[in-house]
Image (cartoon, rainbow, N blue to C red):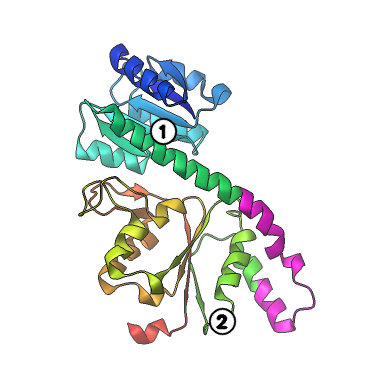
Amino acid sequence: MKIFVVDDERLIRVTLADDLRDEGHEVIEFSNAISALAQLKEMNPEIIITDLKMPKMSGIEFLEKIKAQNKNIQVILMTAFSTIQTAIEAMKLGAYDYVRKPFDNDEMLIAIKRIEELIKIKRENKFLKAELQPKYDFSAFVGVSNSVKQLFEHIKIVADKETSILITGETGTGKELLTKIIHFNSNRKDNPLVKVSCAILSREIFESELFGHEKGAFTGADKSQTGRFEHADTGTIFLDDIDDVPLDLQVKLLRVLEEREVERVGGNAPIKINIRVIASTKKDLRKLV
């Protein structure tokens, strides 16, 4: 991974950079955000670790400028002056994580490994989508009935819209196929399509699986973990059998639908996500209200 480490405190910057190099990463050090920003486009780092309070340009302002240039760069903020409000602001602006000084470098290395896994998944998804996309192109469906052609016309209209979609129908009627056709014919086709089978997730793991969790949120949570909603960021999430979402989590799901933000289990900072939601059900949801 190519990583920028940006901090005006030389000892912290050099120590962290050396540890990252020992892990095999390519690390470029900067003492201020302006110098790092000048090299952003040319060097194209995958990860930027930056201090929050620096002369000339703050970490928050730097974060905004990074995301304006390249939203795919993952940013970790570090500071000795952390507040809950600052953490919330950073997450809303797209920071991946927020680390308090002084920190154990192992903590930072774990965060980097999580980002590596996320980037790997996104790259694999992009490759798979390149293979799958022709399969779901409208031109691939020949000799279909007039009713199916009419359905495709409706899909063409909604595919590039950002509205959430509910697909209803009995088991085996092709709800998942329709989801794939919508996704691969939308402007999100190069980004993740994440499926969640609501019917097979137990209540105990449902919340953590969808929303993710922070370290120490519950017994066995020895590290933070992103949920399915975060995995689907910039793409589409398919909630199959949405009627099986536990009642007490439906309020939390509503927040995702309305605000496009999630809060991990054990966390207190909402995380902004850019997703399109497609849900399916074999039931009449109006009768379940």
- Give the x, y percent position of residue 188: 57, 54
Q: Which residue is mark 1?
A: 64
Write the residue at 34% across / 56% down. Answer: 211
Q: Is residue 77 magenta?
A: no
138 shown above or below 271: below
Write the residue at 63% across / 66% down. Answer: 181
Residue 232 tag number: none
Q: Residues within 10 Å of mark 1 (few under 14, many from 20)?
A: some
Check disc 2 and give the amino acid type: Gly
Quarter of the image with the C terminus is bottom left
Q: Residues within 10 Å of mark 2 (few under 14, many from 20)?
A: few
Res 123 → quadrant: top right
- Give the x, y percent position of residue 156: 66, 66
Which of the marked residues, 1 or 2, is nearer the chain's N terminus? Answer: 1
| One can see residue 274 in this view | no
Q: Nearer the viewer, residue 67 or 177?
A: 177
Q: Which residue is mark 2?
A: 172
Q: Which residues are magenta?
A: 127-153
Q: Are marks 1 and 2 in contact (CB under 8 Å)?
A: no
24 shown above or below 13: below
Check disc 1 and give the amino acid type: Glu
Q: Secondary structure at mark 1?
A: helix
Res 140 → quadrant: bottom right
| In this picture, residue 150 sits left or right of residue 243 | right
| In this picture, residue 146 sits left or right of residue 179 | right
